[in-house]
Image: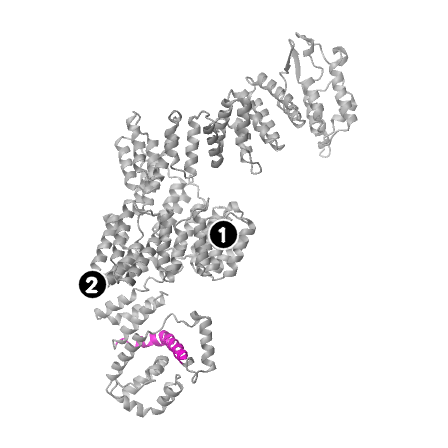
């Protein structure tokens, strides 16, 4: 039975219609051919001849199965049935017999009624389509127009859908035949016949009409010349139809976001004085906003008052006013509604509030919200989202939680964008645990879609805490549990976490694993950017260049981040500042990618490291000239550069103080061109510490209080003061004015905050970025302990910080050991620190000083000293210790040790103590005993009793066992 099924189906497909008994077997056999190859001329001629001859035979001879039809004209009767006709046309078309398709169609699809030649009423869409397509393929344009005209005139009222399908089919076929201009010309002409116009400004209402034309516009392999098409239509079909079609084009081009071509069509309408309607005006305003030609928006809007009938135009006008910082015009445009008898609707409030929120106008957003509540309006999603966004934009993260609660109050469901914004709030607070709670709530709500963007945000947050383990787990959770396909966004985020966690090798391994499976549509360039960053952190210049070549070979479209990596590569690995600066100059002129503060920031950081203050100032001038908004790091570098120059020139910081005040005031009132109008505390912290040291602690305190007044509400001062950077500045301030009790209280709070962060559930790995929290600060803590006679607490505190891996700078080490040597209770601990860590660097520095001196004296120079100096010249950093005993510290602790040993009266006990010191702190004691200790009263006796030891030590200058003493 199964073997017979195909044959049965074939028979059914052929025999499902009713065939006249007069069709002979030879014809039926020929029609069973299912191939698509052209027919031989003999078969084709016989087939067509049979049906044409039969159709023209007398009715009785045509077949006994037929009955005579009574009608007004004998010619309306057809011997061939509708099934036979459709089958025959389909058969001939499949075998590419287009000429005979036309011949059969003209004879079988038409009939004559009252001397009028009309299409039959039972004609079908497939046979009409094949008839018209055959006319097109054989380039019979006049006949095609005539046939399409027949279809439109006869079936428009009864079968409009079929008519439109036919037009779209012919249009699509013409496009595939590369007849683009002719296709557009005929589409416009026929759509005018069908609709009475060719002006379409709503895709959803006209999607059946526009579907194929829009597909043509979106094709990447087609580059239509719309202006030429318009000219041809205006010349042959008149300006009215050209204007209508231009309106359709402008609408569709903005619909597919091809704004540059939309502007060209708009310019054509204006240049040829074609009528401008409301859709044209709306689309060009949208185009100008997208192309950031904001100044053209108001002048174009007011130029065409007769076309101002679309409320959407109001949106673009508001956006343009906001981008132009034309607050008065923006408010006037909104207030104008009150004066024309039409009060602003809740939609108007939403538009204006969101526009103001985008630019950080929090006060204006709050006033509008209060106003709409006074009018008895119920907030909408847009209104609440605007409130939330406005507080986020100004950095008022604590208030964002209150705004988020309004969604629940008004029973409005937060969107995916709302949840994303709340995740960004937690990112701003650096609260990873809070962000996890948001993710948990999202996963419990079936109406919320969790996206890759949510996970990418969470993963990126881990880079601040350098918690690569949690980042890995989040990535796996996204792909395995939520079945979200990774793209370059999430892969790049995870790579960044690895890089920030000093695990560049893991980032590169991730790149190798995923870059092969991603395309440019998946954000592949982001992954390549992070690969460059990883190789930069590994100091691998050749690998960076390899990645650059790979990007070129793949022809990847680069982005702003790519240029940041290129600048970073040039300044960090190649020290090529001129080329890096030239890239910034190129970006300033780039037509698509815009230069921003982060590009300048990389250059400024490099200049700051080499002390090139003028370079930083010149970069800031370049930013101002090109209206590039500054960020907090840019302001930090420029303040530092100005301060350093002022100290270098006149030793005063008045200019810096004035500049800090101006920056604060201008940022708070919105007149400073910054990316974020709430200055980061770091902008204030460094100037504060500098003012404390070089001017007046009171003046620094005034700057601090003014900063809080401008940027924080009273109840927010506490949260701001909890930030490490501000706490550090206050600690420096308290130390400078020697308010040691307050310093001690704040330092305890500082330590508690560190321990609280370390104890969070998300702190599964040590935060590398917190390791430098005590660098530069610890000397003040030492001073406080000395001042309060609590130096005995120092060893335990030092041990605690050291075991936790906190990085302490050389000054901290030196101040610590200096304080430890001054107290007999802690001198042994100081000796251990010096012997274990600091004396080696001290000896290395002095060794090279001696070798340099000897090398200048040919009588004492040796091959050994020369070769060592050559190694030093080849790699200066290799022989430069990071931790070493400074000369003044060395002199101080030697003096303190002299005093300590001088206090031991018993000679035997003194010898025992020295022997113990030699045994436990041999490297330092070797240096200490190279010279006689004249400040110790009993030292002459020590020298006499151990003369052989001292003689050998001072001759060989090496560590000798304590047993030899």
Image quadrant where one finds the N terminus: top right
Q: Check disc 2: other Cα within 10 Å, few if <14, some if 14-19, many if 20+.
A: few
Task: Provide the residue span drawn in magenta.
Answer: 825-853
Q: Residue at x 42, y 29 (%)?
A: 281
Q: Residue at x 43, y 32 (%)?
A: 284
Q: Position of residue 681 (x, y in %)?
A: 30, 54
Residue 527 is labelled as: 1
Q: Position of residue 903 (x, y in %)?
A: 23, 83
Position of 23 relative to 932 (above/below): above
Instruction: Identify the residue under disc 2.
Output: 739
Say which of 9 and 669 sits in front. Answer: 669
Q: Position of residue 919 (x, y in %)?
A: 36, 82
Magenta region's main secondary structure? Answer: helix
Say which of 959 and 766 sits in front. Answer: 959
In the picture, measured across the screen, residue 484 lies left or right of residue 403, that is right
Tell me if residue 95 is in the magenta stretch: no
In the picture, measured across the screen, residue 473 lies left or right of residue 119, that is left
Q: Is residue 950 visible?
A: yes
């Amino acid at each position: 039975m199964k073997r017979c099924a195909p044959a049965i189906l074939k028979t059914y497909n052929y025999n499902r219609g009713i065939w006249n008994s007069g069709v002979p077997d030879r014809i039926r056999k020929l029609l069973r051919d299912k191939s698509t190859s052209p027919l031989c001329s003999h078969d084709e001629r016989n087939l067509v001849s049979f049906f044409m001859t039969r159709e023209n035979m007398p009715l009785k001879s045509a077949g006994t199965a037929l009955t005579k039809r009574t009608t007004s004209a004998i010619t309306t009767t057809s011997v061939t049935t509708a099934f036979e006709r459709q089958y025959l046309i389909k058969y001939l078309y499949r075998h590419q017999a287009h000429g005979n398709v036309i011949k059969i169609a003209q004879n079988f699809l038409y009939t004559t009624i009252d001397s009028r030649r009309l299409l039959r009423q039972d004609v079908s869409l497939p046979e009409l389509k094949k008839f018209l397509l055959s006319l097109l393929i054989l380039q019979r344009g006049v006949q095609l127009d005539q046939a399409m005209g027949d279809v439109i005139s006869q079936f428009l009222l009864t079968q409009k859908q079929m008519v439109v399908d036919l037009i779209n089919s012919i249009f699509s076929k013409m496009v595939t035949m590369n007849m683009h201009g002719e296709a557009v010309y005929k589409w416009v002409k026929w759509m005018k016949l069908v609709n009475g116009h060719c002006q379409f400004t709503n895709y959803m209402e006209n999607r059946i009409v526009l579907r194929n034309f829009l597909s043509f516009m979106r094709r990447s392999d087609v580059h239509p010349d719309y202006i030429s098409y318009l000219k041809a239509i205006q010349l042959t079909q008149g300006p009215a139809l050209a204007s209508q079609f231009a309106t359709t084009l402008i609408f569709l081009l903005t619909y597919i976001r091809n704004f540059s071509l939309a502007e060209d069509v708009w310019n054509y309408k204006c240049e040829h004085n074609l009528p401008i309607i409301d859709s044209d005006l709306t689309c060009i305003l949208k185009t100008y906003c997208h192309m950031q030609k904001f100044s053209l928006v108001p002048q174009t809007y007011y130029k065409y008052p007769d076309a101002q009938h679309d409320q959407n135009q109001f949106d673009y006008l508001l956006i343009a006013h906001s981008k132009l910082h034309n607050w008065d015009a923006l408010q006037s445009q909104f207030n104008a509604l009150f004066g024309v008898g039409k009060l602003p609707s809740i939609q108007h409030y939403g538009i204006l509030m969101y526009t103001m929120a985008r630019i950080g106008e929090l006060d204006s957003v709050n006033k509008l919200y209060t106003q709409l509540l006074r009018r008895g309006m119920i907030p909408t999603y847009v209104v609440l989202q605007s409130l939330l966004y406005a507080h986020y934009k100004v950095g008022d993260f604590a208030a964002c939680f209150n705004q988020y609660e309004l969604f629940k109050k008004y029973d409005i469901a937060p969107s995916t964008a709302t949840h994303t914004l709340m995740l960004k709030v937690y990112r701003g607070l650096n609260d990873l645990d809070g962000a996890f709670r948001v993710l948990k709530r999202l996963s419990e709500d079936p109406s919320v879609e969790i996206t890759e963007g949510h996970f990418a945000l969470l993963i990126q947050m881990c880079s601040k805490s350098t918690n690569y383990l949690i980042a890995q787990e989040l990535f796996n959770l996204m792909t395995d549990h939520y079945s979200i396909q990774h793209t370059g966004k999430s892969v790049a985020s995870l790579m960044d976490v690895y890089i920030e966690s000093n695990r560049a090798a893991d980032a590169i391994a991730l790149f190798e694993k995923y870059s092969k499976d991603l395309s440019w549509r998946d954000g592949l360039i982001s992954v390549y950017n992070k690969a460059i960053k990883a190789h930069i952190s590994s100091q691998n210049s050749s690998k960076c260049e390899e990645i650059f070549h790979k990007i070129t070979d793949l022809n990847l479209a680069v982005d702003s981040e790519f240029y940041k990596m290129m600048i970073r590569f040039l300044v960090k690995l190649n020290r090529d500042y001129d080329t890096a600066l030239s890239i910034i100059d190129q970006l300033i002129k780039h037509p698509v990618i815009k230069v921003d503060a982060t590009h300048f920031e990389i250059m400024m950081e490099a200049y700051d490291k080499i002390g090139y203050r003028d370079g930083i100032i010149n970069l800031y001038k370049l930013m101002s000239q090109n209206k590039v908004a500054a960020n907090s790091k840019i302001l930090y570098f420029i303040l530092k550069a100005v301060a350093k120059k002022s100290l270098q020139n006149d030793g005063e910081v008045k200019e810096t103080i004035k500049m800090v005040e101006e920056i604060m005031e201008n940022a708070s009132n919105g007149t400073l061109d910054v990316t974020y109008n709430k200055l980061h505390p770091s902008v204030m912290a460094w100037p504060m510490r500098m003012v404390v040291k070089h001017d007046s602690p009171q003046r620094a305190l005034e700057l601090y209080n003014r900063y809080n007044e401008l940027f924080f509400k009273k109840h927010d001062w506490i949260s701001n003061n909890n930030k490490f950077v501000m706490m550090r500045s206050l600690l420096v301030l308290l130390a400078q004015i020697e308010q040691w009790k307050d310093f001690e209280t704040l330092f305890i709070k500082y330590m508690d905050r560190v321990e609280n962060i370390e104890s969070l559930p998300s702190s599964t790995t040590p935060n590398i970025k917190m390791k430098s929290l005590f660098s530069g600060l610890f000397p003040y803590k030492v001073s406080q302990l000395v001042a309060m006679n609590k130096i005995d607490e120092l060893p335990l505190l030092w041990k605690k910080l050291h075991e936790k891996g906190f990085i302490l700078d050389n000054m901290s080490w030196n101040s610590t050991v200096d304080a430890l040597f001054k107290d007999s209770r802690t001198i042994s601990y100081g000796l251990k620190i010096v012997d274990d860590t600091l004396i080696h660097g001290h000896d290395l520095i002095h060794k090279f000083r001696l070798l340099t001196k000897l090398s200048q004296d040919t009588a004492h120079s040796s091959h050994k000293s020369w070769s060592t100096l050559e190694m030093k010249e080849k790699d200066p950093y290799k022989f430069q210790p990071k931790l070493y005993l400074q000369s003044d510290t060395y002199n101080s602790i030697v003096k303190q040790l002299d005093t300590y040993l001088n206090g031991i009266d018993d000679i035997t006990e003194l010898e025992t103590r020295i022997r113990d010191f030699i045994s436990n702190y041999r490297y330092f004691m070797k240096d200490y005993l190279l010279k006689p200790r004249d400040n110790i009263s009993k030292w002459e006796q020590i020298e006499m009793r151990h003369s052989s030891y001292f003689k050998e030590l001072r001759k060989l200058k090496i560590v000798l066992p304590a047993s030899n003493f």
